[in-house]
């Protein structure tokens, strides 16, 4: 089977109730709700693309030109309703490696959405692209995200590593691989 190079196109991935797809102008209100949630972003780096600009419409307009060099952000939709973002980032072409992340609206927590969305990303990356290594990082306090990773076959390889996530002090993170 011929595998495409990652970032040669914006993927559309659908399985059951969940779609991972490009964001459009109609998603601005939901994206705004997400980026304004301090609870959602308490376990995330400060420098995420969608939080770098005041106007989420600007973010959506430029997500697939400015953001497509080493990363891609897709909307997570359940039965057509925006629930969050799925990200593939930190692309390293020579070793066919990518990192993954996700963030959901609070009302979508605890429903298996992150687990399903991550599983879809993993399947897409391994089955349809030239990616061979998938990694993830979580704050050590983010036990829910650690569970999502474990359910998708990720293994913890480094515990409590200091990393620059844009906060005043280094952030203690767990490193995962699949």
Image (spheres, rainbow, N blue to C red):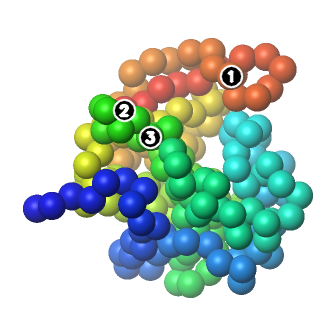
Quadrant of the image occupied by residue 29: bottom right
- SS type, badge 2: strand
Please provide percent x and percent y for residue 75.
58, 68
| Mark 3 neighbour density, 10 Å: few (under 14) some (14–19) many (20 or more) | many
Q: Nearer the viewer, mark 3 or mark 2?
A: 3
Q: Is residue 178 above or below residue 104?
A: above
Identity of the residue drawn at 54% across and 77% down:
78
Circles 3, 2 touching at the beta carbon (< 8 Å): no
Of the numbered discs 2 and 1, the one sitting upstream in the chain is 1
Q: Nearer the viewer, mark 2 or mark 1?
A: 1
Q: Which residue is mark 2?
A: 177
Identity of the residue drawn at 64% across and 55% down:
66
Residue 41 left/right relative to 141: right
Q: Which residue is mark 1?
A: 164
Q: Is residue 136 above or below residue 27?
A: above
* Label number found at residue 91: 3
């Amino acid at each position: 089977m011929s595998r495409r190079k990652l970032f040669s196109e914006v993927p559309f991935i659908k399985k059951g109730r969940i779609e991972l797809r490009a964001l459009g102008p109609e998603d601005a209100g939901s994206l705004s709700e997400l980026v304004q949630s301090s609870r959602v972003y308490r376990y995330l780096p400060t420098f995420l693309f969608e939080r770098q600009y005041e106007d989420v419409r600007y973010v959506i307009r430029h997500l697939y030109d400015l953001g497509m060099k080493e990363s891609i952000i897709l909307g997570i939709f359940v039965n057509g309703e925006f629930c969050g973002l799925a990200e593939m980032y930190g692309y390293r072409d020579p070793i066919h490696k990518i990192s993954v992340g996700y963030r959901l609206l609070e009302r979508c927590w605890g429903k298996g959405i992150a687990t399903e969305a991550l599983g879809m990303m993993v399947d897409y990356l391994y089955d349809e692209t030239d990616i061979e290594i998938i990694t993830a990082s979580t704050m050590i306090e983010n036990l829910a995200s650690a569970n999502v990773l474990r359910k998708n076959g990720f293994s913890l390889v480094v515990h409590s590593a200091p990393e620059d996530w844009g906060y005043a002090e280094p952030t203690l993170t767990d490193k995962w691989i699949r």
